[in-house]
Amino acid sequence: MAHAVSAVTAQPFREELTRIITIFIAVDGSRQLNLSDRERSAVLHALQHTTHPSALRAAFTSAEYSLRRQAHPNFIRWTICNGNRPRVIFARGLGISLILLGILADLLITLSSASRAYRVIPIIGLILGISTLIAAWKGMCVVLHGMHHRHLRPWELFADPEDASIKNSSSNSLIDSSPVAKSYEDEPWVARYEKRSVIRKIFDREVWVQEPALRQIQDTIFVQSLVGAFLVSCIIVGVFCAVPNGGFF
């Protein structure tokens, strides 16, 4: 019995693993991983007997799957957005307005006695409106993309260089010693950003998109939106061109 106790106490990194269990594995942990009951029980059972890294295999497999299949794809979709929410909503409204104006122009030309060739002119507004709407559906503003710019994130607008240096220095430790769960809602920039007017949010500060891979993804989305807008616009204009002249004016 004494030999078993001494074997447990002699295990390396037992104190560190106890902190890991408290923060990441335990049900009431401040930053518990999204583990099933079976996975959590298997990890806790293995850690009772050994501190070998293989005891964390179930937690590692689950965390890696969540990272690759959920967190990383969601992060990519989030980084594609080059504008904040008010700017994207504004872009959607602009796209819908251009589409409605294009359809209205085609309708008026069709009801008039003008030549059918004039019905092709509104395709410009339709392409611009539909492409803007498709890009905004992906969270992109085509105006910002044309300059390869993005809006500063809210926490970047109110970033304190001194505070950032403190956070960077404290992030060098493997595990945060604080057992309290942290929420972004408690950050001081949240209240300050909410006080900004909608107009100011729409035309917020911009910076250059530095990541080449991100610019390439945004370029691909922009080209896809243009191609889709061109095809849909051709169908709409084709329908108007097939309708006989109204001759009302």
Image (cartoon, rainbow, N blue to C red):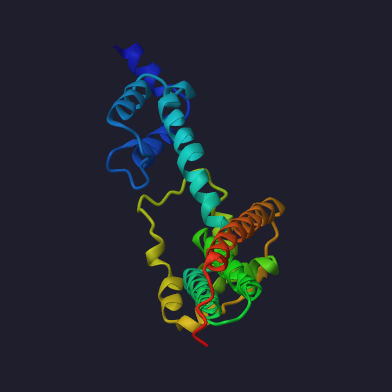
Residue 66 percent location from the top left of the image: 44, 38
Give the left or right position of residue 164, taking residue 17 as reference.
Answer: right
Residue 208 percent location from the top left of the image: 69, 66
Out of 199 and 157, give the one closest to the viewer: 199
**Looking at the image, which residue is at 52% across and 52% down?**
77
Give the left or right position of residue 23, taking residue 218 as reference.
Answer: left
Image quarter for residue 39? Answer: top left
Out of 34 and 19, give the one closest to the viewer: 34
Residue sticking out furthest to the bottom: 249
Q: Is residue 141 visible?
A: no
Instruction: Please identify the quadrant where the N terminus is shown.
Output: top left
Please give the count of numbered marks on the rendered protein.
0
Residue 74 percent location from the top left of the image: 49, 49
Image quarter for residue 125? Answer: bottom right
Relative to 231, residue 115 above or below? below
**Looking at the image, which residue is at 34% across and 39% down?**
22
**Looking at the image, which residue is at 48% across and 72% down?**
96
Out of 197 and 81, give the one closest to the viewer: 81
Relative to 6, residue 85 above or below? below
Relative to 223, residue 126 above or below? below
Image quarter for residue 38? Answer: top left
Residue 185 percent location from the top left of the image: 38, 65
**Looking at the image, which residue is at 36% across and 21% down?**
46
